[in-house]
Image: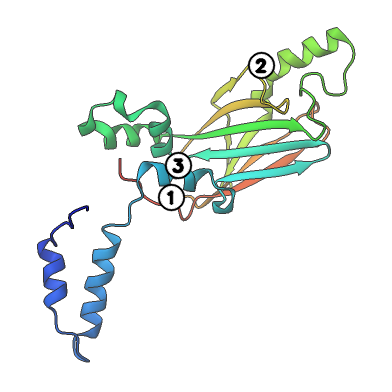
Amino acid sequence: MKARRPLNLFARQVCLLKVGPANFFTFASFLLLFCSCDSRLNKQSYIKWVTDYQNNLHVKSYHADLIFDLQYQPAAYVLIQRGIENYNPDSLLVEVEKLSDVQYYILTISTKDKVDLINYGLTDVAAKQQRQYYFSYRFQDNIALDDDGKILPCILYHAQKPTTADGGRVFVLGFENPNRNSVSAKIVITSDVLNASPVKIEIAKSNIPQVDL
């Protein structure tokens, strides 16, 4: 059986507080403060929360015959994915602060027919090579981030070569983060290669929980 942790001094004071009409609001304030101090998620729960479509950091959008899957990656999430064990425990908060200079996203584009995006709608080999080149390099210039009304260019771009199981292509994106208090952001894709252009995908950043690193 797991031993119960002893109450700290603050918790003991709350427990000893007599709740009457005169000090009800004082008690309620103490209780709210105490509970909020212990509201951080563990790493596994945090990852699950961030990737859950219901929490609006992970969004799927359908345009024409294409499926756009966008995952916003908060700084703490990026650090966890890179492997916390690779960092000095005393410097984790410093690393999160550094990572917060950039907004990180994972964009996956696939087709409803589960055909490789590079080959979709094409039969000519030369045309497929041109599309491969486009998504490897030039696609970055057609992606921007509307961050609470401020348009930001894509400054970090990597097109992963392996396709997903359904033929999708994965793109790692990064944008500056001038306003760390922004509550929403919208990826805007304007590309002649995509029949669905322009594509706008919005995520919400207002209720992201804290994580115990």
Which secondary structure lies at badge 1?
A: loop
Identify the mark nearer the N-term, 3 or 1. Answer: 3
At horizontal 68% and vertical 26% (from top left) the residue drawn is 165
Q: Which mark is residue 181?
A: 1
Q: Is residue 71 visible?
A: yes
The amino acid type, in three-letter code, at marker 3 is Ile
Q: In the rendered view, tell whether residue 16 sits above or below residue 169.
A: below
Name the residue beneath numbered marker 2. 136
Front residue (pair 38, 101) = 38
Q: Position of residue 210 (x, y in %)?
A: 36, 49
Does the image show residue 197? no
Where is residue 33? Give x, y as percent: 25, 66
Front tag of 3 and 1: 3
Mark 2 element type: helix
Marks 3 and 2, how far apart at CA: 29 Å
Judged left or right of residue 158, residue 207 is left
Q: In which quadrant is the C terminus drawn? A: top left
Amino acid at circle 1: Asn
Please tell me the numbered disc located at residue 59: none
Q: Which residue is drawn at the image coordinates 78% and 10% (left, top)?
A: 129
> Which residue is disc 3 drawn over?
47
Residue 15 percent location from the top left of the image: 15, 74
- Please state which amino acid type lies under the numbered disc 2: Ser
Task: Work out how far the residue at label 3 is from the one at label 1, CA to CA, in angstroms.
Answer: 21 Å
* Identity of the residue furthest to the top in this view: 126
Between marks 2 and 1 in the image, the one whose residue lies nearer the viewer: 2
Please identify the quarter of the rendering in which residue 26 is found. bottom left
Q: Is residue 197 left or right of residue 19?
A: right
**Residue most extreme to the right:** 123
Q: Residues within 10 Å of mark 2 (few under 14, many from 20)?
A: some
Q: Judge whether 71 appears above or below 53 on screen.
A: above
